[in-house]
Amino acid sequence: MQPIFLIGFMGSGKSTLGRALATATGYQFIDLDSYIEVRYHSNIRDIFASRGEDGFRDIERRMLHEVSDFEDVIVACGGGTPCFFDNMDRMNAHGLTVMLTATHETLLRRLLAGRRRRPLIASMDDARLGAFIEESIGRRMPFYSKASHFFPSDRLESRQQIAETVADFISRFIPQCADNHPTTDPTQ
Ligand code: S3P
């Protein structure tokens, strides 16, 4: 299978959904930020601090090119990955791109909880973060809208919701795996 690239704004659930999809399908999960961190022996915050955003985007592009040659992988991109260089064209040429859409309220709630490890928003107060989400999505939409598919990702808040969202995603985009995973969380 060609790679499936999950794209979307920070907090849209790319990593949560990607990891759960990999467990359900047996494909390998790659979180692009984690892949960069392992390869560069550094975390994203430190890479931004030492090389600036331009340096980070350059690394991100190179690592994206590398993983886009892999087979049988589900790749959770960073929120900005589609918006630089030829990244979106590269993903569309090498695999299936799925843009995760979540409401403003969902993004804000998730990002308020996960602000600290994201350098672009780490120092923002709550009001500024709300405005930043609006502005950034507006600016990024021309890139995000090049995705070949769109998928709502608000329902990832409990194990049951994740299981149902995974089942929905698989039936739409990876139907060859639809028979070998449960549609509800077996632990519930
Ligand atoms: C970024 C999103 C982050 C990470 C970096 C920049 C962005 O990934 O790549 O902090 O520009 O939106 P997540 O979307 O996984 O938070």
Image: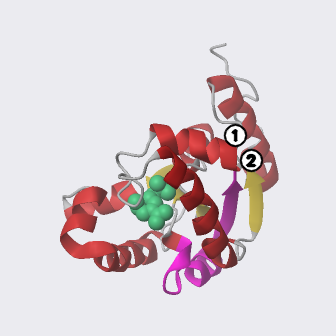
Q: Total of numbered circles in the picture? A: 2
| Rendered residue at 77%/38% (across/down) | 179
Residue 147: x and y, percent?
70, 71
| Rendered residue at 67%/68% (across/down) | 96
- Disc 2/disc 1 C-alpha distance (Å): 5 Å
- Answer above or below: position of 62 versus 32: below
Residue under label 2, please give it: 169
To which quarter of the image does residue 4 belong?
bottom right
Helix, strand or loop status at disc 2:
helix
Towards the viewer: 117 or 86:
117
Mark 2 Cβ and ligand 1 under 8 Å apart: no
The amino acid sitting under disc 1 is Val
Residue 3: x and y, percent?
58, 65
| Residue situated furthest front in the rendering | 127
Q: Is residue 2 visible?
A: no
Residue under label 1, please give it: 166
Asked whether disc 2 touches disc 1, contact meaning CB atoms under 8 Å apart, the reply is yes
Q: Is residue 85 magenta?
A: yes
Q: Is residue 10 visible?
A: yes
Density class for disc 2 (Cα within 10 Å; few <14, some 14-19, many ≥20) is some
Rendered-image quadrant of the C terminus: top right
For the magenta stretch, what is the residue range?
82-102
| Rendered residue at 64%/77% (across/down) | 143
Taking the image in four quarters, ligand 1 sits in the one at bottom left
Q: Is residue 140 magenta?
A: no
The amino acid sitting under disc 2 is Phe
Residue 165: x and y, percent?
73, 38
| Residue situated furthest top in the rendering | 188
